[in-house]
């Protein structure tokens, strides 16, 4: 499964790692975990990790991105991690690279690179990178293990989501051979300052329901401006305030921005990915996103979610 990717890594002295914008734990974990795996197992390699800032995952090791000139891409290998669509790749200079590869676990949307390792059944991209390390018999440092484990934990919903299976725990057990500081990791993952707690409470009070009990939140551009926080915190950061409401199987968070209405769709029961795909988005079967034209299209998405619930009681 990994042969072509490994050969590409072997061919190049410079490797530049990309991932999706507004990174989560899996995007950073796979990007930085692979960086340390290459440095620890191949001599003479120069490895860079590029993209926008780590945000709330800034506690992860080596999460300050490298700043490199365009010239660094000449004859380099660029590897894109945890990203299903070109427009979501952070730093579009990957097109300057001498060779391109991708590792991803999202539902296939489009081919991005000649060399692609894709498994949408994997709980995380970090899990795929862990598989490669296991298959190759690579040395895995404490830093690499912690980074990869962090991505597995976060993208599996703390091992709660459907993609979690025996394979997931085999990967985790492999990484746990290193003395990962779980107390510190979970302290960082669950830490929230008082302002964040107040924001979540504010969004909890905004929750509404469709006739078939699809939960949703709609935040206008004016409300976004008044909140004085970034749109990512409002959009993806607040979607799961609706996650554990009894009787709610699907939920969606709409956030108005200058570029359109950000739409984060989630479900604990149904495959909502086709709805996201119909509106130019994508992701996973039960966790997808899209950028919509306007409020009218948001209402269309909401109606489709409501209909999906009615078709599958």
Image: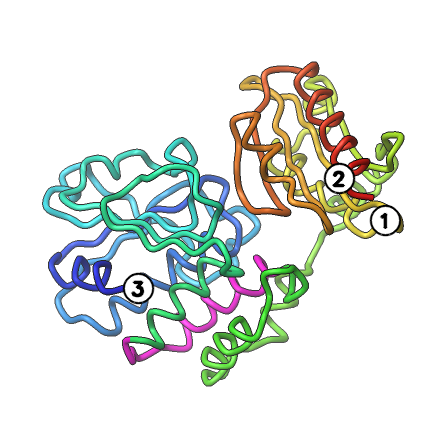
**Helix, strand or loop under label 3:** loop
Disc 2 marks which residue? Answer: 251
Disc 1 marks which residue? Answer: 245
Of tags 2 and 3, the one toward the viewer is 3
The numbered mark, 3 or 1, whose residue comes first in the sequence reads 3
**Helix, strand or loop under label 2:** strand
- Camera-side residue of 206 and 46: 206
Q: Position of residue 138 (x, y in %)?
A: 29, 78
Q: Is residue 116 magenta?
A: no
Q: Residues within 10 Å of mark 2 (few under 14, many from 20)?
A: many
Q: Residues within 10 Å of mark 3 (few under 14, many from 20)?
A: few
Query: In the rendered structure, which segment of residues is drawn in magenta?
Result: 136-156
Is residue 152 placed above or below 281 in the rendered structure?
below
CB-based contact (under 8 Å), mark 1 and mark 2: yes
CB-based contact (under 8 Å), mark 2 and mark 3: no
Q: Residue at x 37, y 34 (%)?
A: 86
The numbered mark, 1 or 2, whose residue comes first in the sequence reads 1
Is residue 266 placed above or below 43 in the rendered structure?
above
Disc 3 marks which residue? Answer: 1
Q: Position of residue 83 (x, y in %)?
A: 42, 44
């Amino acid at each position: 499964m990994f042969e072509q990717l490994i050969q590409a890594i072997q061919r190049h002295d410079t490797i530049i790692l990309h991932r999706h914008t507004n990174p989560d734990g899996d995007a950073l974990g796979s990007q930085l975990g692979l960086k340390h795996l290459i440095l620890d197992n191949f001599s003479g390699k120069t490895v860079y990790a590029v993209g926008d800032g780590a945000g709330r995952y800034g506690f992860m090791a080596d999460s300050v991105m490298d700043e490199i000139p365009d010239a660094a891409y000449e004859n380099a290998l660029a590897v894109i991690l945890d990203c299903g669509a070109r427009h979501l790749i952070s730093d579009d200079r990957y097109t300057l690279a001498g060779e391109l590869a991708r590792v991803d676990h999202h539902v296939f949307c489009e081919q991005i690179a000649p060399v692609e390792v894709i498994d949408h059944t994997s709980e995380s991209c970090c899990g795929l990178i862990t598989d490669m390390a296991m298959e190759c018999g690579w040395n895995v440092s404490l830093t690499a293990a912690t980074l990869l484990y962090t991505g597995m934990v976060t993208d599996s919903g703390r091992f709660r989501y459907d993609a979690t299976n025996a394979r997931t725990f085999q990967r985790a057990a492999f990484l746990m051979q290193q003395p990962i500081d779980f107390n510190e990791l979970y302290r960082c993952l669950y830490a929230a300052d008082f302002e964040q707690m107040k924001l979540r409470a504010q969004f909890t009070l905004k929750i509404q329901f469709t006739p078939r009990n699809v939960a949703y939140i709609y935040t206008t551009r004016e409300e976004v401006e008044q909140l004085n926080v970034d749109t990512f915190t409002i959009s993806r950061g607040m979607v799961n305030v609706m996650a554990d409401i009894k009787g709610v199987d699907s939920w969606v968070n709409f956030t108005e921005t200058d570029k359109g209405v950000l739409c984060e769709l989630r479900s604990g029961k149904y495959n909502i990915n086709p709805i996201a795909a119909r509106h130019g988005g994508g992701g996973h079967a039960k966790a997808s996103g899209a950028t919509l034209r306007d409020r009218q299209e948001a209402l269309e998405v909401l109606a489709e979610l409501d209909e999906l619930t009615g078709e599958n009681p």
